[in-house]
Structure formats: C-alpha cells, structure tokens
Image (cartoon, helix red, strand yellow):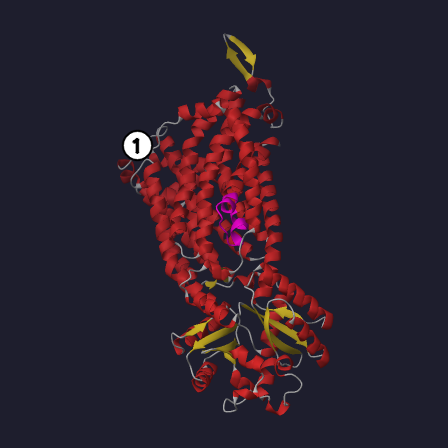
C-alpha cells in the first residue's frame, strides 16, 4: 500500500519523468542496429560458421553474389567488371577475364568455363565482398552495384536479399504500428466503457513500448523479426494490465469518496493481479532463450523485457495519467457494448458432457495436423518476400538462365595432395544436381598451361592454408534435394580431407533445419514445464496445471494444425515461437476462470454452480483480452508483404480467438468432469467447512 500511495502522491513527477525518459528511449531505438541475416544466429561452434570465418580471415572474402547481365558485348562486360571491382568492399569479381586476358580468344578456354559464364546473350559474374553477408558495408556495396548496372542486370544472393528485406521492413514497420494501434483502439472503444479510455491506455502502453525499444541499444543489435513484432506483441499482451487497473479503479470509486484513495487501493489490487498474470507470459518468452538458434533469445529477451516495462507502466504511468485526466475520463464513460452472458454460461455448463466429448474428437485431427505442419515449414528466406522484389527476380533469372539455384563453397586444406583434390572434385561432379565445380584444378585441369593462368586467379582461389572451390547446384536452398546433396558432398570431402569444410547459404540452412528441429522440442518442453510449475504454485494444486495446460495446448494444436489442412507452408520460426507465445499469453484466461471456480467451491458452492459462476464472471474479461490480442495482430497480418511477419501475426491473431473459445467451451467441461480430482489434489479444498451447503433447510456436504 505504501508503494501505491507513493504513486498517487507523486503522479505529476511520474508523468513528467515518463515524458523525459521518452527522449533517450527514442535515441536508443534509432541507434540500435537491426540484423536482417538469419544465418548469423546459428551456434558459433558449427563447422559452417567456422568456415565462414576462415573464408573472411584467409581469403578476405565474406559475402558472395552472382550478377547476370543480358545483351552486353564481352568488352562492355569487361568494363562493367572493372567498375564493380572499384566499388568499395568488392574484393573479387570472377569472370572470363579472371582466367585470361579478354583479348585472348574465348576458344582458348575449356568449354566448361565458357558455359559457366555465358549462356546465349546472358553473362554471369561472381562477386565476392570483403565484409560479411549482412554487414552495413556489404549492404551499401550491393546498393552501389545496383546503381552501377542497368535494368538488364540482376543481382542475386543472400546480401541482396538482406538489402531488399531491410528496405521493405523499413517501409512497412511504421504502418504495422499504426494498424495495430488503430485496431486496438477500435476494439477497446467497443469493448470498454469509455470513449477517452482507449487513448489514455495507448499513450501509457506506447511509452512502455518506447522504453523497451530504446533499451535494446544495450543488446548491440536485434533481429528484424524482433523489431517488427515487439511493439505489436507488447501492445497486445500488456493491454490487459491497463484494463485491470481501470476496472479496479472504477470499483474502488464506489467504495471511497476520494478518487486518489480509490486509485491507491486500485494500484495495490492491480499490482497483485498483474504480477501474477505477467509471470506466465514472461516465462513463455524466456523459454525462447533456451533455443541454440539464438534468434529465440533475441525475441525472448526483448519481449520478456517488454512485459516487465508494461507492468511497471501499468502501476505508475497509467495511474498518473488517469488521475490527471479523471474528470474527462468519467464524463466520457458509456455503457459497454458487451451483452449479458449469464444464459450462455448456463447453457455451456448444461451440455458439458457433449463439450468434453467434442474436445477429445477435435484433439486427434488437430494434433495430427500440428505434427504435419511442423514437417512442412520452409527455411528459404526468399519465400518470405513478394515475387516482384529485385532479389527474387534475380534468383529466378539465375536459375532459369544458368540452372544455378544455390552455390556451395568448399574449403580444401592445402596439405591435401593435388591428385586427391582432383579425385575428390571429380566425385563431387558426379553427385546428383551438381551443375559445375569452379576451382583452379577442376576447371583448367593439369593439362592447361600454368603460365596462362593469371596470378590474380590463384590469389582469388588459394591462400596459405586453403584452396577455395565454388560448387554450383541446380537445387534450391533449404530443399530436401539440396540437403541430401550436401550430405553426399560432405561424405566425399571428409574421405579425402578431414579438415575440409563445405560452407555457404545452403549448408548453413541445412544446419539451421537440424538446429531448429531440436530447438522446437526443447522450447516446448521448457515453456510447458515452467508454466506448469507457476500454475501449480499459484493455484496450490497438482491437477489444475494439467487441466489448464491441456486446454491451451489443444488451442495451439488447432491453430498450428490448420495450415496443414489448408495447404499452407509456414516459415520455420513461426511454429516454435507461436506455440510458446500462445501458451504464455493466453493461459491467463484459464487461470482467471479456475481461480474464480476455486473461490466459489471453497465458499460452499456445488460444482455446477461454482463452474457456472466462474464462467459467467470470466467471459467478459476473456473476450476483452482475446479480442485485444486479435485486434493488435490481425491487421498487421493482412497488410504485411513479408510472409514471416504476416504468418506470425496471423497465427497470434487466430491463436487468441481459438484460445478464447477453448477456455470458454472446454475448460468448464473439464472442471465439471474432474471436480472430485481437483478438490482432493488442491490445497485447502478438502476442508469440510468449504463443502457444506444448506439444502431444504439442512446443511449437507456437496
């Protein structure tokens, strides 16, 4: 109570401090670097990651791109290649003139070299950068290349994808926030009892979001997914806390004449409720930190931090604003548009055997669909972008014209004998889907005159410790075919060179697939276990956590099972994050109803009356909460052209509705079915005085 009275007394100072803190928060938000490269979140001890470091350290090569030009004469291509070499951070441009002087007839080169760089009127150049794939310098170099070439040139590769993704995100993100705010405001105008209330809520939550985004500066950088989702998610998840305070304040106004005293009691009551409610949400986000693919930690830390800022803002900034604007807030109140739901509650409890059976019937296909959805996710980030984006068109052109869908880089130890290297590369050429192998020995062969090989070519492809070989594949990144191909190549490489390493986008993606498959199991287990323990401690029960988690897990199975039956493929990160977020964010609905059920049972109500009362009193809060989460995410899902963002927002919006419906329909049925078990496995519920009721003038046990 001392804290609550302090907030009320210092309301002017708190509001002023909140506004002042917004300034450094904006600066921190602007200065936080955004990472658009998913591959950087792979564990650092993986061979593919170590190989990328070696490539940069020994060869001075990091990012890699193919450039396809059409209708250009060889001399003009040579001039273009020289222009590209002059661009800052372009380390190497590998083309026909890298193998011999452009004045020497092409016929001098082996056919496989000509086929590698020429197809009809199209010419391909391989470009290496001296910086990593998603470095700011690389992205600027890609922009410089695009400004150097004309419309008949196509720049492909992961760095080009990162550039286009960044541009699209920066264009869409302000709109995301605007849509989320507008939809959330509309939902609150309909569901709450005041015309001004939603805007006060949004101002308070907006400051908390700003603090969260500003404090990301201390993390060094955050993922673009985290940046795009954090504000929307924080708004959606913490809106409930503001509603708790507002409802508590209005209840206390009927008990206390002084609105400041009423607010102090409301803060005290809200703090207890909100802290208890937020713990499960924070636990869900923290579970993401157990992923070895560190994007989970990135999103988990930022969102857990956002929930904490939301709680602090709810019991400090919001009370200050409500007290300062108390008169206009009270004058603009109106009746809520939510109908009375008493009859609905009675009807649901009345047919509980049917609903319990329906839950079992729905669970089987939902779980089967859920398992299949996890097997049908995609990992190719190019699939996240619209087809009219430059890099998507460039990758399509490269595949159509040169039949190159992905490129692997092989690092061969210089200790490996030349004859072993040639034998190894010959075997690799025979692997299904290999288009060509580009290395000094593999392309030119031992019969080609060494004095005709430019010195710069040797410098490009050889270092003191390693020889670099480029392997072009007909198979797309992250496809089953390319993953099988990578496995076969790795087997061949290790047979000849134990130190040899296959690196590049496709090998990294293969590692990502294996890593995230493991992560999915770990994160699910951690989130369920942690939330189980929290519910067990809060409810002082062994059975209640099983019941509550089973209801929300069914909602998750339905939500993530639908894409399989609808023929949709999700980005790989979506099922991992959504299963945890949906559990942490919506299990509160079930806790709210169960807590009221316990209270009614322990006060002497029979199970049917206790469940009916719990359902009737909880439905309005559950609907407001669920619709708030739905409203804040659904509009973004419809708007975004980035599939990974739209998919996750759609899953969150749909998950909120499904969890809301599951708790309202199925939880009362389970409480009725397992009432005896709950009573005997929950602290203080077996006391006889809690189960006595007057029936026809006599006290009986119920």
- Residue name at image x 43 percent, y 27 percent: 616
In magenta segment, residue 569: yes
Q: Identify the residue position indicated by label 1 in the image.
A: 335
Viewer-proximal residue, 622 or 32? 622
Left or right: where does residue 459 sit relative to residue 187?
right
- From what the image shows, is residue 521 above or below residue 683? below
Quadrant hosting residue 536:
top right
Please report the bounds of the magenta region as a residue range: 561-578
Front one among 242 and 184: 184
Q: Is residue 501 above or below residue 559?
A: below
- The picture places residue 377, in percent across and down from the top left corner, at 54, 53
Which residue is pictured at 57% across the width and 52% down the height? 289
Question: Going 55% across and 51% down the picture, which residue do you hit?
Answer: 376
Quarter the N terminus occupies: top left
Residue 434 percent location from the top left of the image:
60, 70
Which residue occupies the extreme top position in the image?
Answer: 697
SS label for mark 1:
loop
The C terminus: image quadrant: top right
State whether the magenta stretch is mostly helix, strand or loop: helix
Q: Quadrant of residue 506?
A: bottom right
Relative to 608, does residue 5 appear above or below in the rendering? below
């Amino acid at each position: 109570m001392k804290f609550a009275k302090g907030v009320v007394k210092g309301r002017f100072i708190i509001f002023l401090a909140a506004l002042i803190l917004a300034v450094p928060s904006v600066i921190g938000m602007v200065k936080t670097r955004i990472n658009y490269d998913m591959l950087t979140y792979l564990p650092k001890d993986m061979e593919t990651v170590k190989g990328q470091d070696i490539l940069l350290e020994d060869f001075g090569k990091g990012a890699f791109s193919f450039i396809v030009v059409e209708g250009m004469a060889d001399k003009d291509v040579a001039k273009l290649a020289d222009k590209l070499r002059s661009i800052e951070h372009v380390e190497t441009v590998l083309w026909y003139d890298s193998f011999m002087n452009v004045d020497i007839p092409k016929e001098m080169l082996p056919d496989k070299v000509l086929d590698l760089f020429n197809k009809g009127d199209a010419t391909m150049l391989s470009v290496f950068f001296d910086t990593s794939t998603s470095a700011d310098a690389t992205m600027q170099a890609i922009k410089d290349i695009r400004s150097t070439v004309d419309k008949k040139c196509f720049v492909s590769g992961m760095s080009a994808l990162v550039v286009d993704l960044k541009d699209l995100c920066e264009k869409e993100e302000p709109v995301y926030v605007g849509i989320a705010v507008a939809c959330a405001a509309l939902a609150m105008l309909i569901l709450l009892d005041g015309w001004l209330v939603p805007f006060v809520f949004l101002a308070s939550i907006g400051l908390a979001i700003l603090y969260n985004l500003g404090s990301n500066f201390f993390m060094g950088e955050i993922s673009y997914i985290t940046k795009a989702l954090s504000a929307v998610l924080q708004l959606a998840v913490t809106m409930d806390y503001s509603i708790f305070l507002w409802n508590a304040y209005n209840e206390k106004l009927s008990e206390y004449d002084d609105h400041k005293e009423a607010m102090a009691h409301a803060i005290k009551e809200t703090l207890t409720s909100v802290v208890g409610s937020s713990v499960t949400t924070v636990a869900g986000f923290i579970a993401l930190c157990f992923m070895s693919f560190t994007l989970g930690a990135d999103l988990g830390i930022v969102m857990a931090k956002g929930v904490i800022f939301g709680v602090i803002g709810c019991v400090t900034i919001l009370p200050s604003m409500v007290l300062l604007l108390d008169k206009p807030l009270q004058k603009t109140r109106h009746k809520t548009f939510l109908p009375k739901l008493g009859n609905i509650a009675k009807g649901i409890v009345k047919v509980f055997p049917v609903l319990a059976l329906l839950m079992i019937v729905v669970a089987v296909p939902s779980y089967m669909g859920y398992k299949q959805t996890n097997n049908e996710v995609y990992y190719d980030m190019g699939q996240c972008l619209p087809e009219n984006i430059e890099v998507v068109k460039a990758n399509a052109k490269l595949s159509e014209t040169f039949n190159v869908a992905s490129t692997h880089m092989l690092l061969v130890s210089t200790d490996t004998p030349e004859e072993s290297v040639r034998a190894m590369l010959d075997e690799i050429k025979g692997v299904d889907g290999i288009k060509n192998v580009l290395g000094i020995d593999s392309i030119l062969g031992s019969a080609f005159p060494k004095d005709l090989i430019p010195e710069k070519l040797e410098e490009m492809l050889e270092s003191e410790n390693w020889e670099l070989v480029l392997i072009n594949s007909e198979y797309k990144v992250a496809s089953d075919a390319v993953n099988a191909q990578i496995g076969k190549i790795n087997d061949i490489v290790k047979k000849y060179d134990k130190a040899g390493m296959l690196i590049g986008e496709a090998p990294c993606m293969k590692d990502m697939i294996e890593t995230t498959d493991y992560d999915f199991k770990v994160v699910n287990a951690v989130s369920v276990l942690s939330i189980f323990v929290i519910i067990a401690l809060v409810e002082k029960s062994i059975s209640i956590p099983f019941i509550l988690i089973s209801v929300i897990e069914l909602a998750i199975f339905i939500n993530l099972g639908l894409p399989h039956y609808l023929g949709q493929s999700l980005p790989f990160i979506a099922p991992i994050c959504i299963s945890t977020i949906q559990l942490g964010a919506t299990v509160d609905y079930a806790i709210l109803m169960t807590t009221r059920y316990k209270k009614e049972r322990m006060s002497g109500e029979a199970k049917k009356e206790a469940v009916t009362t719990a359902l009737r009193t909880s439905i309005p809060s559950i609907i407001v909460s669920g619709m708030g989460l739905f409203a804040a995410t659904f509009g973004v899902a419809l708007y975004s052209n980035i599939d990974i963002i739209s998919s996750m927002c759609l899953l969150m919006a749909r998950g909120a509705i499904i969890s809301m419906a599951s708790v309202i329909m199925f939880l009362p049925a389970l409480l009725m079915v397992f009432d005896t078990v709950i009573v005997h496995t929950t602290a203080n519920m077996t006391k006889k005085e809690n189960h006595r009721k007057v029936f026809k003038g006599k006290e009986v046990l119920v």
